[in-house]
Amino acid sequence: MKAANLSVRERGQVTLPKALRDALDLDAGDTVKAVQIGDAIVLMPQRLELDALRREVQRLMKKHKITADELLAGL
């Protein structure tokens, strides 16, 4: 699926068709970035980059007081 007609609901929400979500491997709760280009809106999936992922893991480890050894032992 290359294009789809979407309706904007009262609260500004739109639903992406399942074929688009599947093609882009999007799940509930995933983040997409909306960019206005002229009269168009482009939606792009936001994936955590390695450095951002590293920072997030470190933040969660500190928050939950988990060491790297404890984290790896759970894998």
Image (tube, rainbow, N blue to C red):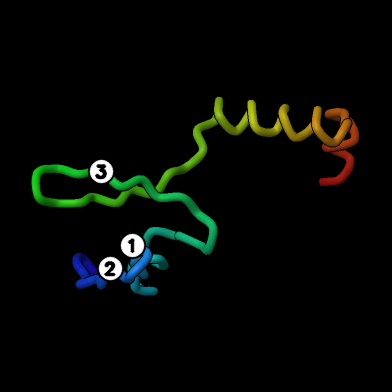
| Nearer the camera: disc 1 or disc 3 | 1
Relative to the observer, which residue lies in front, 60 or 12? 12
Q: Residue at x 56, y 29 (%)?
A: 52
Query: Against 23, is 36 above or below?
Result: above
Residue 18 lies in what quarter of the image? bottom left
**Residue beneath label 2, please?**
8
Query: Against 12, is 43 above or below?
Result: above
| Residue type highlighted by circle 1 | Gly
Q: Secondary structure at mark 3?
A: strand
| Residue type highlighted by circle 2 | Val
Q: Residue at x 80, y 32 (%)?
A: 63
Q: Are marks 2 and 1 in contact (CB under 8 Å)?
A: yes
Query: Against 10, is 24 above or below?
Result: above
- Within 10 Å of disc 1 (Cα), the crowding (few <14, some 14-19, many 20+) is few
**Residue beneath label 1, please?**
12
- Within 10 Å of disc 2 (Cα), the crowding (few <14, some 14-19, many 20+) is few
